[in-house]
Image (cartoon, rainbow, N blue to C red):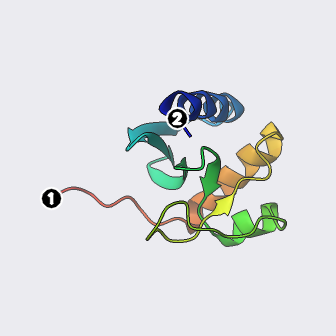
Amino acid sequence: MGKEQNKRMMEYVMDQLCGLSGVRNIPMMGGYVFYYNDRIFGGIYDSGELMIKITETSRASMPDSVPVAPYQGAKEMLPCTVLEDREQLQQMVAGMWAELPERKRKK
């Protein structure tokens, strides 16, 4: 996937999540990492699709999603299967927040 395709996907994801305040993304190595209230919940990597961290909420929200590593050496994540459903996506991300680790602060 190219950087332009990843950028379009990032813009689509941000549009789908526009009802949640506190969502932002950071460009990283041609992809994007997504945060909700300063906790990473997912990203766009080599495949060009939104990948979601594995939590109880994300598994329950996407029971049809099969974990895969987004790039070599990475922890497995879930391909997002609810991206088209804005309300369900927003509920999942909001529900995941308490299950996600706090962001590590730079020293």
Q: In this view, does 43 lie to the left or right of 62?
A: left
Tell me where residue 60 appears, x and y as whole percent: 79, 68
In the picture shown, does residue 18 fall above or below 53?
above
- Tag 2 and tag 1, C-beta contact below 8 Å: no
Tell me where residue 7 appears, x and y as whole percent: 54, 29
Mark 1 lies on a secondary structure that is loop
**Which quadrant of the view contains residue 104?**
bottom left
Q: Out of 100 and 47, give the one closest to the viewer.
A: 47
Q: Nearer the viewer, mark 2 or mark 1?
A: 2
Residue visible at 38% across and 43% down in the picture: 28
Which residue lies under the disc numbered 1?
107
Q: Out of 59 and 20, give the one closest to the viewer.
A: 59
Q: Is residue 36 visible?
A: no
Among numbered discs 2 and 1, the one appearing first in the sequence: 2
Tell me where residue 3 appears, x and y as whole percent: 48, 33
Q: Is residue 38 left or right of residue 20?
A: left
Q: Can residue 52 be seen in this view?
A: yes
Tell me where residue 30 appears, x and y as whole percent: 42, 40
Residue type, label 2: Gly
Q: Out of 104 and 53, give the one closest to the viewer.
A: 53
Residue visible at 75% across and 46% down in the picture: 89
**Which quadrant of the view contains residue 76?**
bottom right
Residue type, label 1: Lys
Mark 2 lies on a secondary structure that is loop
Which residue lies under the disc numbered 2?
2
Q: Out of 44 and 71, give the one closest to the viewer.
A: 71
**Which quadrant of the view contains residue 20?**
top right
In the picture shown, does residue 32 fall above or below 76?
above
Mark 1 packing: few (<14 Cα in 10 Å), some, or many (20+)?
few
